[in-house]
Image (cartoon, rainbow, N blue to C red):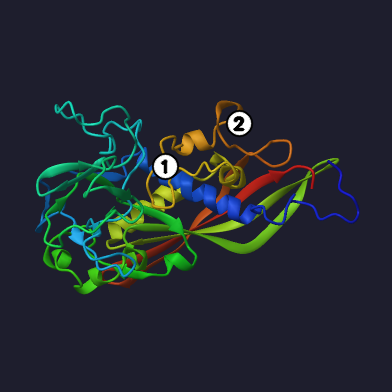
Amino acid sequence: MPHGENELKGFGDVGDSTITTVIQDNLVEFFDWGLLEKGNFFNISIPSSGHYGGSKHKLRLVDDPRYNSGQVWEGFRSNWVWQSGLSFNRQPKVIQKQLEDATYPLSKRLPGVSGVFVGGEFRPASGVGPYAHHIDHPRGRVIFDTAISTSSDVQAEFSYKWINVTRANHPFFREVQYRSQRADRDFNFTGSGDWSQLTETRLQLPTIAIEMVTKREMTPFQLGGGQYVTTDILFHVLAETEFTRDKMLDIVSLQKDRKITLFDPDRIGRNDAYPLDWRGSPKSNSLRYPELVAPSADGGYDFNPHTRSGHVRLKDTNITAVSAINPNLYHGVVRTSTEVILPGI
């Protein structure tokens, strides 16, 4: 569509997401889902212990000033898996348990962690009464509607994502939490050490953080309009071992020349189609990444090809930095260029 001489081009509404935000959001979701499909999760069963001891299935009481004491309980790792139906040869623990008790509500099988055990008795997330609760998957915690006894024994079966994928903006700059895969020592003591901080301020490793670089190149696409828009991206990888850092550098750099389908975050927002609600719990109709990037005719939220590009391509990928910040923190950077075609600008 031609633009008037007094009209800004490249976007339709000042409230719309621009290409920088769209690319970053899509890359985070693409890598998060892609890693899940390659087995990037650990299943925690009851009982479950680590090499160093501790009980990984036990939840600890959280001293969160936003809630009453006894409402919030968290696992030793955050970023719990809510997605189901992976093509990987094993599945995360995200489907409601099929219990023999006929009174158990089996009418609906929602994605996500199914519930918790309090004092050895299973309390479903779909339940009501004094143990009604919801699961906050990104923060890896359970929040009861009303406080329960602070001496309660709260346990859960869940799966957590090993490699975390995030945006390298303000929330990324948090205090690194070492040994986050161990549930021994001070995990079970409220207000102790690293665990005295809320999960929002702890950065659990390993992590891939995606940073948008302020470098932009544009070249003509075709006669009559359109542009190739090239934006540089930095993938920061952080790990507690050199081996894990190098593994993540390989994973990212090997995606060179990949073409990734884009979803439209603005249409997702306008249609209230975010997979998780404000509490971090999946909705009854939660769409996973493959459904989000599906064509609109199939119920997805891909970009409209008549107004925006529907894909981004990764090119010119190089490992540009490798360092050991300290004996327990290893850092590396993969720099790549993303290329999208914006027709009509």
Q: Earlier in the sequence, mark 1 or mark 2?
A: 1
Q: Position of residue 62 (x, y in %)?
A: 24, 64
Residue type, numbered disc 2: Ser
200 vs 105, left or right, is: right
Disc 1 element: helix
Residue type, numbered disc 1: Trp
Q: Is residue 215 above or below residue 293?
A: below
Q: Which residue is mark 1?
A: 33
50 vs 37, left or right, is: left
Quadrant assignment for the N terminus: top right
Q: Which mark is residue 296?
A: 2
| Viewer-proximal residue among 39 and 79 | 79
Q: Position of residue 295 (x, y in %)?
A: 59, 30
Residue 254 visible from this viewpoint: no
Residue lying at 19% horizontally and 57% vertically, measured from the top left: 148
Q: Position of residue 90 (x, y in %)?
A: 26, 33
Name the mark nearer the viewer: 1 or 2.
2
Residue lying at 58% horizontally and 63% vertically, measured from the top left: 213
Residue 196 visible from this viewpoint: yes
Q: Quadrant of residue 311?
A: top right
